[in-house]
Image (tube, rainbow, N blue to C red):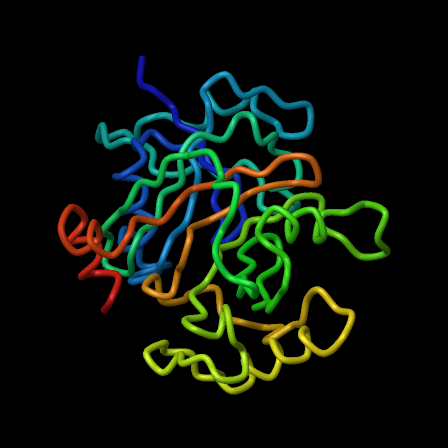
Amino acid sequence: MDEIYLYLSMTPEALIASMLPPVAFGIYLAVGTKKRSGGQAMYFDLKNDFQSEYFNLSSIADRCVRHSDGQPKHSVYISIYRVLEHVPLEVVNNLYLSTRDGQVLKLQQEKQPSQIEGNYYLYKEICPVHPLIASSLNPKEFCRFITDPSKPIYAPKICFAEMNLGEMAEDPENGCADNLPYHHLNHIRDCLLELNSQDKHTKTVDRIEPLEYQYRCVKSGFFLGDYNSLLYFPFPPLQELESKYHRWWRSADL
């Protein structure tokens, strides 16, 4: 019997069943259809014992079958609305990042370091909303802040990446960040300075930041969490990207 995989897509948010294993699925999402050619993809694979009262998983075996010519079923969409909040963190396996031309990088979960360097942070929220946020909170604090149910506005779960601030992470006013390709660099600096001068923990840099972004701006890695738990998927250091993952890194910089 053919194996069926479950994927939690972040761009866009969706729960998808597929007969394709993770890397092949990423290639398919990025370049495999005329509907979405040359686009980034970000998704998690889920444990095969995932059960849910919210999602209709009972029909997957009937819907996710080979085509008449024997080709595997590439995708069966289970849900496209409020997906992330209904997927338990304990069923999440690995994170996969696909470039626009279909190179796929696998990131495994690791324990979050006790201290991530810097006094200031820049977060790209990815799902379920996707603004760009400047903050004085470290990733764990930021996740709890965003998912705090006692607040009038919160998200039950959040997926985000920590982005590079260069020297501005220590010195927002004078720190150099000229090597970073942000088109709104001065605005980022102003937002960080506002955090420094006010009793404020976060400042929105851009409310409608595009879902696609430059992977080379990712700093520590990617995070997925709720108010009580946080999963961490570290981004490889530059030396590894240029050697071990050279093909992916070259593609990501296109």
> Is residue 181 left or right of 15 when viewed as pictured?
left
Residue 106: name its quadrant.
top left
Quarter of the picture containing the C terminus is bottom left
> Is residue 42 left or right of 152 when viewed as pictured?
left
Image x and y of residue 46, in percent: 46, 29
Classify 113 as above or below 21: below
Q: Nearer the viewer, residue 117 or 228?
A: 117
Q: Nearer the viewer, residue 22 or 122?
A: 122
The residue lying at 68 percent from left, 29 percent from top is: 54
Residue 195: name its quadrant.
bottom right
Image mark count: 0
Q: Residue furthest top?
A: 1
Quarter of the picture containing the N terminus is top left
The residue lying at 56 percent from left, 59 percent from top is: 125
Image x and y of residue 33, in percent: 30, 53
Classify 232 as above or below 98: above
Classify 24 as above or below 97: above
> Is residue 103 left or right of 132 when viewed as pictured?
left
The residue lying at 70 percent from left, 40 percent from top is: 227
Image x and y of residue 34, in percent: 31, 59
